[in-house]
Amino acid sequence: MTEANPVILAVSARRGHHFSKTPQLSIRLVEGEGVDGDGHRGVTVKHRSRARFNPTLPNLRQVHLVHSELFDELRAQGYELAAGDIGENVLTRGIDLLGLPMGTRLLLGREAVVEVTGLRNPCIQMDRFREGLMQATLARAEDGSLIRKAGVMSVVVSAGDVRPGDPIAIELPAEPHQPLKPV
């Protein structure tokens, strides 16, 4: 569900390769690269396992967005999470990130624009952070297909500063819409 006024609740970044990120007063998105000062910033893939496979692949995971409604769901299961805990750069409220089609553009604040590239695939690092968390971010649809709930990944289309409290505007791609897949 997307509300009338989706908003950014928190922004996070962290130098180096770490699972969790540190909440910030603001982050700067750099066109074609990601979050300034973040370990996953770059034109080519920065995710360690993917970089070992092929370090020349494009970085489709420059900015990680998570809907805070997931934190509400996980809290009901006994998982207390804070902004940045599961590696997200942008924590949102009031937008159905998982329901967006591939290629959706999100205006974050006044000038930064990201394009959604796909779903985050929950990994074993989640269980290393909190036992059972990976499974808690997965579900099964009625048809048996896997539902990944750990947020979406995106690339930076237009640079800009992003802060908690900034609005989010949604620009859907031309139809036919393609559902998100893991990246």
Image (tube, rainbow, N blue to C red):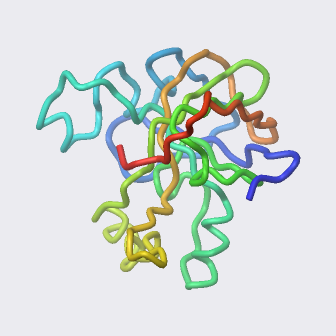
Residue at the extreme front:
176
Residue at the extreme left:
53
Please provide percent x and percent y for residue 105.
Answer: 63, 29
For residue 122, what is the image quadrant? bottom left
Q: Is residue 121 left or right of residue 21?
A: left
Residue at 19%, 21% in the rendered image: 56
- Between 2 and 7, which is closer to the camera in this rendering? 2
Image quadrant holding the N terminus, namely bottom right
Please provide percent x and percent y for residue 182.
Answer: 37, 49
For residue 132, what is the image quadrant? bottom left
Q: Is residue 129 above or below residue 51?
A: below
For residue 175, what is the image quadrant? top right
Image quadrant holding the C terminus, namely top left
Q: Is residue 169 above or below residue 49?
A: above
Residue at the extreme bottom:
77
Q: How many marks?
A: 0
Residue at 54%, 77% in the rendered image: 79
Residue at 28%, 39% in the rendered image: 47
- Between 4 and 150, which is closer to the camera in this rendering? 4
- Between 140 and 143, which is closer to the camera in this rendering? 143
Please provide percent x and percent y for residue 72.
Answer: 67, 72
Residue at 53%, 36% in the rendered image: 116
